[in-house]
Amino acid sequence: MRLSRRALLGLSAAGLALPRRLFAASEGSTRKFLFVFCPGGWDPTYVFAPLWGVSGVDMPPDDSVAATIGGFSLVDSGGRPSVRRCFERWGSRAALVQGISVPSVAHEVCRRIVMTGSRQAERDGWDVLIASAAGASLPMPLVHLSGPMFALDHADAVVRMGERGQLASLLQGVALGQSDMPVTVPSAEVQALQRAYVASRAAEAASAAGAGWAARQASAQALAGERLESMLLEADKLTLTGEDSLAEQGAVIAELFEQGLARCAMIAYEGPNGQAWDTHTENYKQGPNFEGLFEGLDDILTDLSARTGSAGSLLDDTTVVLLSEMGRDPRLNKNNGKEHWPWTSALLLGAGIRGGVTVGGWTDGVSGETVDPSTGEPTDSGITVTTEVLGATLLALADVDPGEFIDAPTPLTAVLA
């Protein structure tokens, strides 16, 4: 027996209590954000960092060469044609940020630092903050398909679809029937009693809410019910499940963006056959990883450009953020792999981005150069490109005041169109 939609709405009122937002919604901004995360730590010398001639750097052992592609100084290879094709097609809409400092070499710590600017569990991720700033108007402010997620004060903004499309099963009311364990669903009469009880308690709580925490809880429960009702109305029309490929994940998100149901999304790419990026052995696997990444990225950008946005294509409304939690040591180890490295790169594409811009560079020690944030040029009097600097840039792109969350924020205005 499937649970009715009314039953699901009753459960939402009972269990989806949401905290009040800590800042006012930025209703005027329609820009959307798709985060594409590469877990494990990628090696910038396979695409972003042509460091031939720098002592102590082991460049890819294939046919790689330094090349200018789409206005960027990159690493080119016949084994990675999708990288060249993607930069040729979309370089005019991309900005490359080099030498980002990630002061750790532990995976989970680095992921938290990259996505929140802090190693402490005290902040929401940049994607969560951006999604929450969309206000109560969207039923699915941040859609999480795969990849890291750091949600604290604004966890209410996150809708986890599940890597196997569990959200669709929940919305359709068939999830219990798909369980590996036998499940006995209450009869229709019992469900009706449950709904009446929940509605009665919710009404009591709302009438006695007054002000403060209780009032916020009552308001949050009402908002949760409204969001769930919106999702239920759309569930039969939308494709809420996708396969593991990057392009297929991107297509699910693009549909939600196009329908105006979400502002942000997080998806991950773990390489062909899920072999991931943590190449402590056989670092050459970074090559096919980057080839698959840029093949999927090109498909996503093509898809976004073919869909309708608010004033052009959906790509004109969407900023794509491509990143990993760390880089890899410049030198090969005894297993022809590379260890963790606390400096990395990121690529920004699409809406709000000044195309063809490279920010920063690499020192002879393969750390990031200090830069002028207004030009992106390396300078001794510049700033270190920290993850807080990257986060301030993303928040500024989203019309969210970075100063609400970061002390003395310095966005990279060089990349902002």
Image (cartoon, rainbow, N blue to C red):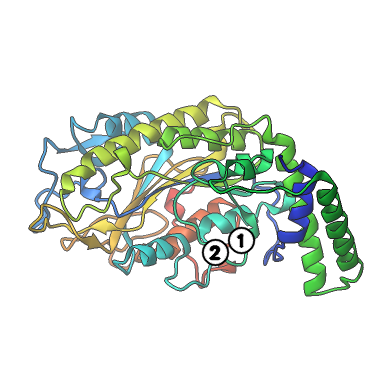
Please give the name of the residue rendered at 76% of the width and 44% of the height, measured from the top-left corner: 229
Give the label on residue 350, or none: none
| Residue at mark 2 | 124
Dot 1 or dot 2: first in sequence order is: 2
* Picture coordinates of residue 355, whole percent (x, y): 41, 40
> Where, quadrant-wise, is the N terminus in this rendering?
top right
Taking the image as shown, residue 35 lies to the left or right of residue 20, namely: left
Which amino acid, mark 1? Ala
The answer to whether residue 72 is seen in the rendering is no
The answer to whether residue 320 is seen in the rendering is yes
Which amino acid, mark 2? Asp
Which residue is most to the top? 306
Give the label on residue 155, or none: 1
Mark 1 in CB contact with mark 2 (< 8 angstroms): yes
User: Based on the displayed image, in which of its 4 quarters is residue 208 positioned?
Assistant: bottom right
Please give the name of the residue rendered at 89% of the width and 60% of the height, measured from the top-left corner: 200
138, above or below 332, in the image: above
